[in-house]
Amino acid sequence: MAGERKMRAMVLDGPGQPLRATELPVPEPGPGEVLLKVHACGVCRTDLHLLDGEVDVPAPPRVLGHQIVGEVVAGEPPAGAGAGGLVGVPWLGWTDGDCEYCRTGRENLCPNARFTGRDIDGGQAEYTVADTRYCFAIPAAFGPLDAAPLLCAGLIGYRALRMCGDAARLGLYGFGAAAHILTQVAAWQGRRVFAFTREGDERTQRFALELGAEWAGASEQRPPEQLDAAIIFAPVGGLVPLALAALAPGGIVVCGGIHMSDIPSFPYELLWMERTLKSVANLTRSDATELLELATRVPVRTTVSRYELADAGRALEDLRAGAFTGAAVIVP
């Protein structure tokens, strides 16, 4: 079409293939949708799982990215988003609203859900379209780079923390984007945080202590005290028996990733004494509303490494290698 507006974007053509820089038409919002000019898009380990084929992308090519902060340029903004205000778009991009899970407040389990950057083009582009009902006004206290990691790392961490109940001694296995946010929240709540990293990663251990953890060590180490709960963010199944072994009786281990390598067999003794093992899946809109309000009160301060849009592939490989602390954010 003559005069069609174009935008820069990074697309995934298929599993194992590098991201490709291209130009796409600027998308047109439909009824109930908004067109956003993307200001920032956080990089998530789920993006790596999509890149590697560990999580399926149903209809490539696809624009990845599901921690989007942007400005509404067309369509009706979500509630609370004033003119020129920032809007956030998380992983959950659409649900049917009619299944048994949606009707009972468990839309994160909707079998027909569509996810941003997987079923719907995401934020590794200059513009993106989103369902207004699944967008959220970003509090004025946060700029685009600060807010982006809250929209998945923060949300999944917060949902996992809620599953831990009132656990006072909390272990975090894998100290990346989610754990660096959650440590601040948990410490503010009066919990004691124990951080577990790759063996020898003294830089990340120091980072965890600076954020409020009272102990930091390698994942293979036993903490100085038994834990009431542990959250595993690293996608490593071998961490499950290690975390169970660190629990006090009645403790809980929550697996916080969308994908994890196989969990090795372990003796029933590790699970006995009413210990619990469970997973967290996706998020709900109420999670987002609660976390954004809580992050303002704490206040959460995200640590970010900035990447240009053309460097999205490098950002993913740096995430794989653990080349930065905190979170990576792409700025188109």
Image: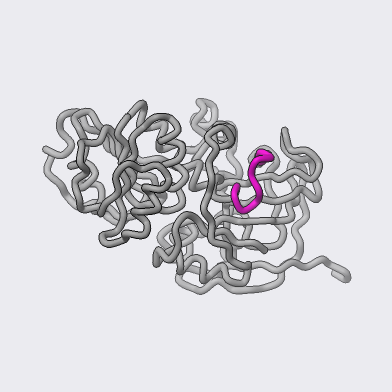
The structure residue drawn at horizontal position 36% and vertical position 54%, both measured from the top left corner, is 206
As displayed, is residue 235 above or below residue 154?
A: below
As displayed, is residue 149 above or below residue 316?
A: above
Q: Residue furthest right?
A: 2
What quarter of the picture does the C terminus occupy? bottom right
Q: Percent from the top left, x then y, of residue 227?
A: 25, 36
For this rendering, which residue is in front, 115 or 66? Answer: 66
Q: Percent from the top left, x then y, of residue 86?
A: 71, 45
Quarter assignment of residue 205: bottom left
For this rendering, which residue is in front, 18 or 85? Answer: 85
The structure residue drawn at horizontal position 69% and vertical position 40%, both measured from the top left corner, is 140
Mark yes or no: residue 234 visible: no
For this rendering, which residue is in front, 126 or 22? Answer: 126
Q: Percent from the top left, x then y, of residue 190?
A: 39, 29
Q: Is residue 172 left or right of residue 47?
A: left
Which residues make up the magenta segment? 136-147
Quarter assignment of residue 172: top left
